Structure formats: structure tokens, C-alpha cells
Image (tube, rainbow, N blue to C red):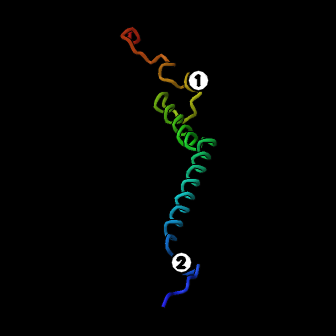
């Protein structure tokens, strides 16, 4: 006897259809996420902000934003720290 055809019991190809839908959804979400990150410059802000403070610390020895006024005021080359024998006479 032949089984009657029921659309609810037809599972042939269902796995493939669901896999294609999940891959399509994943690619769409990934593309939308990367577009958002690029437009808002999230990675650049996360790296550049702290890095300017670290760069100023390595250059001038102070924890501050990298501004020319602060660097000029606190830089090691801004003060005459040289000692010569003439200073001791």
C-alpha cells in the first residue's frame, strides 16, 4: 500500500533550505555590522584615543592628550638640563 502524500511530512530538502536561510541571514548580519563599525569608526576611536595618551607619555613623560602646548611645556628638551664644568667654578 502506498503512503499518502502530506506536505507536513515531506522533510526532503528541509535541512538544505534551513542551512541556506541561516547562511544568508549570517552574511547579512555580518555585512550590516561591519558597515556600522566602519561608519561610526568604532575601532578607530577605541584605539586612537588611548594611543594618543600613551604616545604623549613616551614622548614627554606626562599622561595627557597629544597637544603641542603641553608637549612644549613638559618635553625634556624644553629645559636646559645640561651640566658643564663651568657651572661648578
The mark lying in front, picked from 2 and 1, is 2
Q: Quadrant of the C terminus?
A: top left
Q: Residue furthest bottom?
A: 1
| Neighbourhood count class around disc 2 (C-alpha, 10 Å): few under 14, some 14–19, many 20 upward | few
| Neighbourhood count class around disc 1 (C-alpha, 10 Å): few under 14, some 14–19, many 20 upward | few
Residue 41: x and y, percent? 60, 41
Residue 10's place in the image compared with 50, above or below, is below
Q: Nearer the viewer, residue 49 or 71?
A: 49
Residue 22's place in the image compared with 56, above or below, is below
According to the image, label 2 marks what residue?
A: 10
Res. 4 image quadrant: bottom right
Q: Secondary structure at mark 2?
A: loop
Res. 8 image quadrant: bottom right
Residue 85: x and y, percent? 36, 10
Task: Give the number of the disc on residue 68.
Answer: 1
Image-based side of 51 in relation to 40, left or right: left
Residue 61: x and y, percent? 48, 31
Question: Is tag 2's residue or tag 1's residue first in the polypeptide sequence?
Answer: 2
Amino acid at each position: 500500500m502506498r503512503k499518502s502524500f502530506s506536505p507536513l511530512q515531506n522533510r526532503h530538502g528541509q535541512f538544505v533550505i534551513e542551512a541556506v536561510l541561516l547562511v544568508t541571514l549570517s552574511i547579512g548580519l555580518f555585512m550590516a555590522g561591519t558597515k556600522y563599525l566602519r561608519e561610526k569608526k568604532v575601532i578607530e576611536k577605541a584605539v586612537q584615543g588611548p594611543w594618543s595618551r600613551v604616545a604623549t607619555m613616551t614622548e614627554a613623560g606626562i599622561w595627557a592628550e597629544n597637544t603641542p602646548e603641553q608637549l612644549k611645556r613638559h618635553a625634556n628638551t624644553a629645559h636646559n638640563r645640561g651640566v658643564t664644568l663651568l657651572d661648578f667654578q
